Amino acid sequence: MSNDLRNMIALRPSEPATRGKPVEVIVNYLEVKTNFKYPFIHSYTFDVTIRRREEILILKLIIFSYNKLCNGKNTKTFSEIIIPPKDGIGREERFSAVLKYIKKCKTYHMRQYIKVNANRRWGNDIQNNLRILNNFINSDVRAQSITYKRRHYYPKPDPQRRLFLQGGIELIPGLFQSVHPGWGKLLINIDSRAATFYPSGPLIDWIPRILQREGKSRDELRRGLSRREIYLLMSFIKGISFTTTYNSGNNSKPRKKVSYITEKSAEQIMFNYNGRNISVNQYFLELGMPLEFSLLPSSLISGQKFGVDNLNCVQRKDLADKTTVKPSDRFQRITTALPNVFKYSENKTMKSIGMEIGKEFIKTISRVLEPPKITSSRKNKKIIPSWSVVCFDPSLKEHQVKTAIGTLIEILVVMGLNVQYPQKIIPGNPQDFKKTLALVAQNKNTKVDLQLIVCILANKFNGIYAEIKKICLIDLGINSLCFQSRNILRSRWKQICNNLALRINGKLGGTNSRLIPNQLYFKGSKKYMIIGAYFSHPIAAIVASMDSFAVKYADFIKLFEDMNKYLPEAILFYRESVTERQFKIIMEHEVIKLLDAFKVFYQSRKHPPPNLTFVIMRKQHNTRAKPNNKFKADPKGNGNCQPGTVIDKDIVVPQYFNFYLQSHSSLTGTAIPAYYNVFYDEVGFSRDEMQTLTYNLCFLSVRCSLALSTVTHYIMLTNLQNW
């Protein structure tokens, strides 16, 4: 990034933030001890055209075979490197590799970056330092664990404590660690996590779990599987790697991929062997290796990832139940992993550069902001003259649906909405929902156009939900509301109806609540606009506020002028999911392009362009916090920090205008604070003003009466439609 672009990035205002009640919190960071000298590190390229596992093994063989690899100028070629089979699976392989010296890297750039009052800007040198230091802290644990993504590690689970989801999917607890620049100190961010994998070991042991027939004994399996069971088993394991339960001729087990499961057993499959027609089972019997299970003499190989997107709704719930942990339990897991998994004191790679890690979690002073005052907007309630209900769950009885809808109508009336009983409650066919929705939209029983279709679904995770939303909004131009049928049968149905009523009013253009005047302080400007954007290739989602209360949202900035008869003088732009590595791209292709677009548009209106403040928001990070004093925790939040908790020191760099904000109350699990970085600021917000405004905006939702976890909630919802 050029110096001109770097200098455009907003710096932290000098005036400290003071709003809120101070509370000491513990964060999941360890400090790199101050005796770290940020040494020069030699950089090499390593060229070998093989899989990642063999590449790492070859590199380790080379490193530990030579004390001095290069003199700074030469290239070394290593031939006849032998990699043995992993766990006896596969064949012995021979490779050659080329190791070439590139340059000497200066890690002191990182020391300058984290130094207080240095104002060193982010750049490729800082990013390169982070990459190098992460390689040093992660090399040992990477070699000992199942690795998924970068810096995510899953140690081999204890055989007696393995976890499984319904359907035989294995859940393996894992860990994450990464070097993180802090306020005058270098930190290590550590977090616990879990991932789903295919089970490993003899396939015969997993068949009952996969088929959800836990009571199926081995004797029953010897008799074979039904055609339906074979189909279910094949749909689960097709394409994954396995090995045999017997050795091949070279005393190793072949590694193969499942392509098909035949209905015939090894006793029934015949082939020609030395002029004789014998069965597979007889062949191994003559070799002195009789097959215990002639149906499936195979074993699944460990470390094969099972995609979370492939989980059904029952498995997703099971996953959430098994991975939801209180903050205290989460920190205890990390503490246990320090001596057992990371073993910093024994890490020779880290010792080679003089890096030592502290044993205590970082403690910092957070501030808990006061929640804003909210007023109900009962004057802006909508009339629902025409709406229909479609039930796509055939297991629900008609009287159950009518009773549930009657309760919903009662809540809508109490909230002030003028609503009549729906035209019809229509039984829908989930296999042909397009036709059902089209027939509902064409209903001509009333002279008023249909405003809303309420859809009752048996399952939101089978693809029908997204399709219904798309058809109703794009094809039919009608608002839709979907919920799962199991909610109707809950004792909390009346409470759920309160939430549904808020959503219905919002979908029809009504306002449920708003902040009292002056709660959205915008540096004295009364003409402002708030925009949110999220880009996830190939989808781009943008929403923008249409009134001074920042409650109504639409897609185009032009609507603001049409509705308010004036142009905004200031624009606050929240951009979802950007990392430091993308700073250059964001500045060149988004911030500068926005400024140019505003200039052209406003000149056409003979109006000076607005002041722009561009804020980056991210929740895909690994920062977690808990109050040091349990009596300062959120009384409703399972030991989490209180809503409104702001952290803007110690775990952030001093020069940039950034902070963590936990705006919501998390009733289960560990709350994830949102990370905000004020990237570009023409409005000139102070720390207090930006943090308070951002927190207050989290309360403006038509879907919920409580604060949401981020300002950009609607952007994510729009992006997830994935149309």
Image (spheres, rainbow, N blue to C red):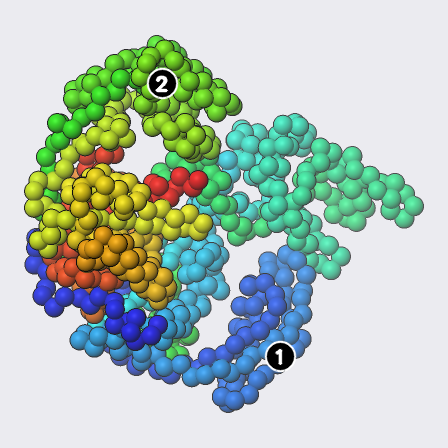
Of residues 641 and 537, which is closer to you in this image? 537
Task: Locate residue 190 relative to residue 264 in the image: left or right.
Answer: left
Residue under the point 11% across and 37% down: 374
579 to the left or right of 16: right
Residue 19 placement: quadrant: bottom left
Tell me which residue sits at (23%, 28%) in the image: 505
Q: Amino acid at mark 2?
A: Val
Q: Looking at the image, which is closer to me, 536 or 650?
A: 536
Residue 122 on image: x %, y %: 30, 71
| Mark 1 secondary-structure assignment | strand
Residue that numbered label 1 is attached to: 78
* Residue 110 vs residue 373, the one in the foreground: 373
Which comes sooner in the sequence, label 1 or label 2? 1
Q: Are marks 1 and 2 in contact (CB under 8 Å)?
A: no
Percent x, y for residue 375? Answer: 10, 35
> Which residue carries the number 2 mark?
389
Amino acid type, callout 1: Phe
Residue 708 at what x, y percent from top left?
A: 23, 42
